[in-house]
Image (cartoon, grey):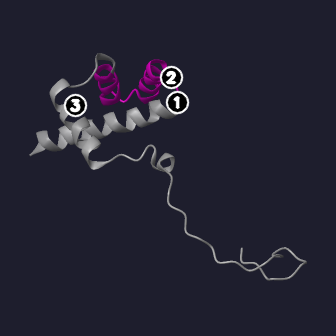
């Protein structure tokens, strides 16, 4: 809100120029970098999936979505994490279908 240089009103006060502030490192928290995503993909390639992830993928293939969501929620703790994991695993299933189809 720009000041109006008046003593009354919503925008009262002396007019000043806004100084652009540098972003805090804490505001960058959670943003995945290219290096981190590359390392995670290599680890996934080498280590594969956890046993519960393989079970969830099997449930998703057999269209038992609710059971898969309940299992991942039990393992991961929150529904939001479970939903993200289900999206990731269903994407992996689709990738394997695309690779197998060609």
Q: Determine which quarter of the picture holds residue 99.
A: top left
Q: Is 22 left or right of 97, judged from the image as shown?
A: right
Q: Nearer the viewer, residue 1 or 64?
A: 1
Q: Few, some or many C-alpha atoms within 10 Å of disc 3 (few <14, some 14-19, many ≥20)?
A: few
Kindly state the secondary structure of the residue where label 3 is placed: helix
For disc 2, the marked residue is 77
Q: Few, some or many C-alpha atoms within 10 Å of disc 1 (few <14, some 14-19, many ≥20)?
A: some
- How far apart marks 2 and 3 lie (CA) works out to 21 Å
Q: Is 96 left or right of 59, judged from the image as shown?
A: left
User: What's the residue at 17%, 44% (across, down)?
Assistant: 98
Residue 99 in magenta stretch: no
Kindly state the secondary structure of the residue where label 2 is placed: loop
Specify the segment rendered in magenta. 53-78
3 or 1: tag closer to the N-terminus:
3
Q: What secondary structure predominates along the stretch shown in magenta?
A: helix
Residue 58 in magenta stretch: yes
Kindly state the secondary structure of the residue where label 1 is placed: helix
> x, y percentage for residue 76?
45, 23
Q: Kindly check if marks 3 and 1 are in contact, taking CB atoms under 8 A apart as contact.
A: no
For disc 1, the marked residue is 79
Q: Nearer the viewer, mark 3 or mark 1?
A: 3
- In the rendered image, the vertical position of residue 26 relative to residue 5, given as above or below: above
2 or 3: tag closer to the N-terminus:
3
Give the numbered dot on residue 44. 3
Q: Which quadrant is home to the N terminus?
A: bottom right
Q: Is 3 left or right of 74, judged from the image as shown?
A: right
- How far apart marks 3 and 1 lie (CA) works out to 23 Å
Q: Nearer the viewer, residue 28 or 91?
A: 28
């Amino acid at each position: 809100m720009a000041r109006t240089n008046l003593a009354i009103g919503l925008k009262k006060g002396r007019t000043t120029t806004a100084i652009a502030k540098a972003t805090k490192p804490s505001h960058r928290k959670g943003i995945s970098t290219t290096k981190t995503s590359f390392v995670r993909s290599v680890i996934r390639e080498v280590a594969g999936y956890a046993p519960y992830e393989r079970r969830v993928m099997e449930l998703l293939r057999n269209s038992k979505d609710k059971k898969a969501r309940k299992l991942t929620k039990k393992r991961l703790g929150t529904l939001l994490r479970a939903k993200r994991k289900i999206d990731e695993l269903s994407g992996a299933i689709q990738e394997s279908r695309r690779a197998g189809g060609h």
